[in-house]
Amino acid sequence: MKLIDGKALAAKMQDELKNKVDALQAAGLIPGLAVILVGEDPASQIYVRNKARQATAIGLNSSVVRLPEDVSEEELLGLIEQYNQAEQWHGILVQLPLPAHISEEKVLLAIDPEKDVDGFHPMNMGRLWSGNPLMIPSTPAGIMEMFRAYDVDLAGKKAVVVGRSNIVGKPMAQLLMMADATVTIAHSRTQNLQELTKQADILVVAIGKDRFIKAADVKEGAVVIDVGMNRDEEGKLHGDVDFDEVKNVAGLITPVPGGVGPMTITMLMEQTVRAAARKLD
Ligand SMILES: Nc1nc2c(c(=O)[nH]1)N[C@@H](CN(C=O)c1ccc(C(=O)N[C@@H](CCC(=O)O)C(=O)O)cc1)CN2
Ligand SMILES: [Mg+2]
């Protein structure tokens, strides 16, 4: 078994990004990332803080707006419109999840697709599925970078994606398909899941079930990517994959923490730098 070190890969990419940002700065352009957080969700607060911190560290301008839990949908939409209009912000994102009284669909639709660095706007989802992506959701984009960095050959391989969310499962499946893998999307209602996962050369798991995938579910030598983040009673973080078991079967495997998570934020930075750089084209 070999470990895929997301933390180290993310750090390396941040260094490369810093150089790109320096070059843009020399051309008179400072990429800007605007992050909007609604409410007090503790995990979201940490992710947003880390996004702002990483943005600053690689030389971006960053803005964080924290809105109260009971902010109206109208007020949030108004703020997004202000950022859409402001030239110095090349990337805009609204941290998810949102409080129940706000429509996620309306909010994602309100973000200018050219600034939608999360890639969640239906226009960007549609562009990805039509094979002509503009913005790619950062978690699956980070996983594709891991495949590249670790020389994982995807063409013709059997890939199984467990999970069908808009932010991970669906875009992941499409990116794998674009890389010529043969892709199956499984989910919580899939029957005989083990039959499918056991055949996978590439197994990506994003279902939010603590240590759900066991050694018996995995093919010998498979590449196993764990997107899960589940906290136990003691506050310890576990993936959707039972790492201690599966590491003995997998050829390559991501840990949790330190695998997919760190790549997610760095890929967001990359999308922001790219969105800014397009202004020079
Ligand atoms: N607007 C968005 N909302 C959400 C996204 C997103 O991409 N855009 N993804 C997740 C949360 N997320 C980023 O926003 C995110 C989650 C986890 C990590 C990460 O680095 N995890 C660490 C462990 C951290 C811990 O100890 O809690 C790891 O896996 O090593 C980064 C980003 C949902 N919302
Ligand atoms: Mg993400």
Image: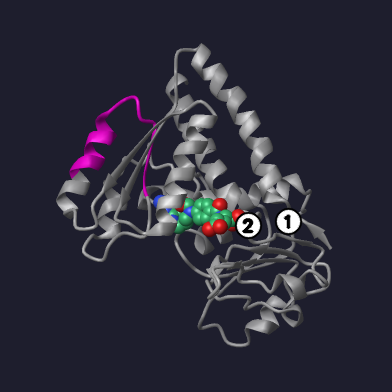
Residue corresponding to mark 1: 154
- Image spot of residue 112 (x, y percent): 31, 40
Which residue is at the far front?
Answer: 234
86 in the magenta segment: yes
Badge 2 crowding class, 10 Å Cα cut-off, few under 14, some 14 to 19, many 20 or more, is: many
Q: Is residue 173 left or right of residue 70?
A: right
Q: Is residue 27 left or right of residue 149?
A: left
Q: Which residues are magenta?
A: 78-94
Q: Is residue 97 above or below residue 193?
A: above
Q: Is residue 67 above or below residue 163?
A: above
The residue depicted at 48 percent of the width and 30 percent of the height is 56
Residue corresponding to mark 2: 176
Quarter of the rendering occupied by the N terminus: bottom right
Which colour scheme appears in the figure?
one colour
| Label pair 2/1, CB-CB below 8 angstroms | yes
Amino acid marked by disc 1: Leu
Q: Is residue 268 above or below residue 86?
A: below
Tag 1, which secondary structure?
loop
- Image spot of residue 237 (x, y percent): 59, 66
Q: Is residue 225 left or right of residue 232?
A: right
Q: Is residue 61 visible?
A: yes
